[in-house]
Image (spheres, helix red, strand yellow):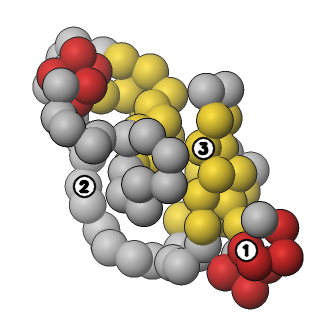
Amino acid sequence: MHGSKRGIIVNGNVRDPEGLQKIKGFNGWIKGTDPSYMRKTLLTSINAPIRIGQTTVLPGDAVLAKKNGVIFIPPHLVEHIV
């Protein structure tokens, strides 16, 4: 879905990728799948800076997601890049 303005980036695994694909308008880039339930996982913040791989992602960053990866774009550069 082009330009949906909604979706998720999961730097880890999800349990039911087929179920997620059935959600209308769902977009996501997911690193992998694992049928087990979540263990030792804790949500510590929302809209806070995070690390994904070697990148720091800040609240407000735009995401360009392609089949093989994602790029995070600082908001002040979006218009120039797009």
Circles 3 and 2: CB distance less than 8 Å? no
Query: What residue type is disc 1 on?
Result: Val
Count neighbours of disc 1 (C-alpha within 10 A) and say few if under 14, some if 14 to 19, many if 20 or more: few
Determine the CA span between mark 3 and mark 1: 14 Å
Q: Earlier in the sequence, mark 3 or mark 1?
A: 3
Towards the viewer: 24 or 75: 24
The answer to whether residue 58 is left or right of residue 77 is left
Query: Which of the labelled discs sits on residue 42, or is there none?
Result: 2
The image quarter in which residue 19 lies: top left
Q: Quadrant of the C terminus?
A: bottom right
- Percent across and percent down for residue 12 are 44, 34
The answer to whether residue 66 is left or right of residue 33 is right
Does residue 20 lie above or below 52 as drawn?
above
**Residue where numbered disc 1 is placed:** 78
Tag 3, which secondary structure? strand
Residue depicted at 51% across the width and 78% down the height: 59
Does residue 33 lie above or below 12 as drawn?
above
Query: Which of the labelled discs sits on residue 65, or is there none?
Result: 3
Does residue 60 lie above or below 82 as drawn?
below
